[in-house]
Image (cartoon, rainbow, N blue to C red):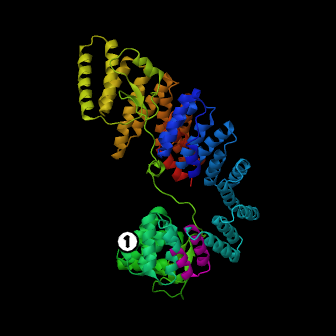
Amino acid sequence: MRRIFYLLLFIPLVSFAQFNTDRLVMIGRSALYYEDYVLSIQYFNQAISQKPWLYEPWFFRGVAKFYLEDYRGAESDCSEAIERNPYVVSAYELRGLCRINQKKYSEAVSDYDRALRYDPENQGLWHNRVLCLIQEKNYDRALAEIDTMIVHWSRYARAYSMQAEVYLMQKDTTKAVQSLDKSLELDPYDGGIWAERAVISLARQQWKEGEEYLSKSIHLLPKHPGNYINRALARYNQSNLRGAMADYDTALDLDPNNFLGHYNRGLLRAQVGDDNRGIEDFDFVLKLEPNNLMALFNRALLLEQTGNLRAAIRDYSKVIEEYPNFWFGLQHRASCYRRLGNTKQAELDEFRILKAQMDKRYGHQPRLSKKQMRKRSDEDLEKYNQIVVADEQEVEHEYKSDYRGRVQNRKAELTLQPMFGLTFSRPKNDVKHDNPYEETVDNFNQKSHARTIYVSCDQTKLDEDRMKQTFTYIDSLSTAIDASKNTSDVKPLLFLRAIAYCSIQNFDNAIDDLGIYLQIDSTSSLAYWQRAVCQAKINEFNAAQGTNIELQSANVLGDLSDAIQLSPKNAYLYYNRGNLYALRQDYQRAIDDYNRAIVLEQDIAEIYYNRGLARIHSKHVAEGIADLSKAGELGIYQAYSVIKKYQK
């Protein structure tokens, strides 16, 4: 991808006649170079809007989405680019990478087949196609392709390492070792190949040899946590507990969420008597997997050891609830009950044990055995104290690095985008300068009022100067209202003052003004709309304080429904009502309202984002990711964080 990226940044412009569009594309490509992917997408959107028949903006937008890990959206954009120009090899290559990341390996092979017709000497295309064939378990064709690669590029070390991987899949470790040795002979500075060689040694339980190979891999790839996890396993099986502990510490520094690292370090800490820090590791494991019974039981043992008996009983009980005949757990829980003076519960547990296994011996916790390991998927509780290894030992080939613009790595909470309301502040957008339009709002503004109102969901705070100006403006409106002689003069002043109150978050006064306004004119959809937004803001605060808001929520729903009846073509009203339904966890009604909003307005990012979340919550994950992809395309960068979380 890096090769594609740098080459295509310098494709010349097509013609002077396309200057405006090409200028947008060039600015977008500049943003891509500086890794500001979200901003670049906005420029490509404008270029596509102006000249949708050009393939370049579609392709470059796909590149941006690829770096944001929106693989589905990137694949779609590549398909659009290919439809417009089917002879661009890079479009097939990028779409193949997108499909690989979605595990669509056979479709990726088709892309590489097509690309190699136009560029048969492209080594990267051959390489990726072989990896896809391996994933498809088409080993015979993969070996044939590798043989062809070796003829063309006899000194390409990675061809031999892929050959070794195929031999391993076919359980022929002898040939695999030969291929890896050849690969290392050609390129002894490839840390990934040393790691692959180590995997074979670990599978053969040749721990010392495996440690040596992993040390060489770590020297070349010092920031790859999987190598440290595997070397810790090799050291542990050679009774080098201190070295294993150091490797787990390093792996967790590099990858703080690594399950195997925390779990196995917890076991080692328990083994050496570091009980409190062992509890910390199992706490972390249980945050990742709250129902992991092995971790629960190990934490219970450590909690009992440190004297936290009630917490130990809590964990023991969860395990026993799932496995009522786990006698070792019953014995420990009974011991905790006795130490707390709860003789009755202790005797109940002891009776269950004696009744089932009168002749079984109990009394001490088995020590951690260096010769025993279990696979992660093995849920036999009798193996609770065994070191965990991955179900399949494999070497990771993808190396990640954080850099500016990788917005999908920023934490994004699964919260809805806020409701649209009316404000005096012009909505801000780095690229898109046109404001959200709604006919009823435009009609109000055309009546030559002193202030222009805008549709916005931005929750910006006023600075000190703007706040003082707003208070002064409210005072002037109040004076004008008091001096007015008829209701026709009062109406717009009340409405403007309500919006001003909203801007300083005085929602109660705003609701009062809007209530008076509706007594004068009960046919104003704008007043119902804004009153619903104000009440929703109050409800949000009250709910956070633990107040029951069911009645107030019904008022919001009533106002929004009245507004929709008066203004049935207002997309923002359907969106707001969809938000209310989503907050009530009535996701199907929420989706229905979002659908109506999208029929009316196809380019509002917030609608797609919230419909995406509603679909995910209603277990339609694929459709939800598609909506989030569209929301990201339209400018909501948080969507990529959610896509990253759920597409796995």
Whether residue 256 is visible here, answered yes or no, is yes
Q: Nearer the viewer, residue 558 or 148?
A: 148
Left/right of residue 469 with respect to residue 343 in the rendered view: left
Q: What residue sits right under mark 1 in the picture?
A: 310
The one of 279 and 340 positioned closer to us in this rendering: 279
Left or right: residue 433 compared with residue 131: left
* 210 drawn magenta: yes
* Nearer to the camera, 422 or 515: 422
Is disc 1 placed on a helix, strand or loop?
helix
Query: Position of 230 compared to 307: left or right?
Result: right
* Rendering coords of residue 194 (x, y %): 57, 72
Q: Residues within 10 Å of mark 1 (few under 14, many from 20)?
A: some
- Where in the figure is residue 62, as x and y percent of width and height? 58, 43
| Magenta stretch bounds | 191-215
Q: Quadrant of the C terminus?
A: bottom right
Q: Please state which of residues 639 and 62 is positioned toward the viewer in this rendering.
A: 62
Q: Position of residue 373 (x, y in %)?
A: 55, 78
- Kind of residue at badge 1: Arg
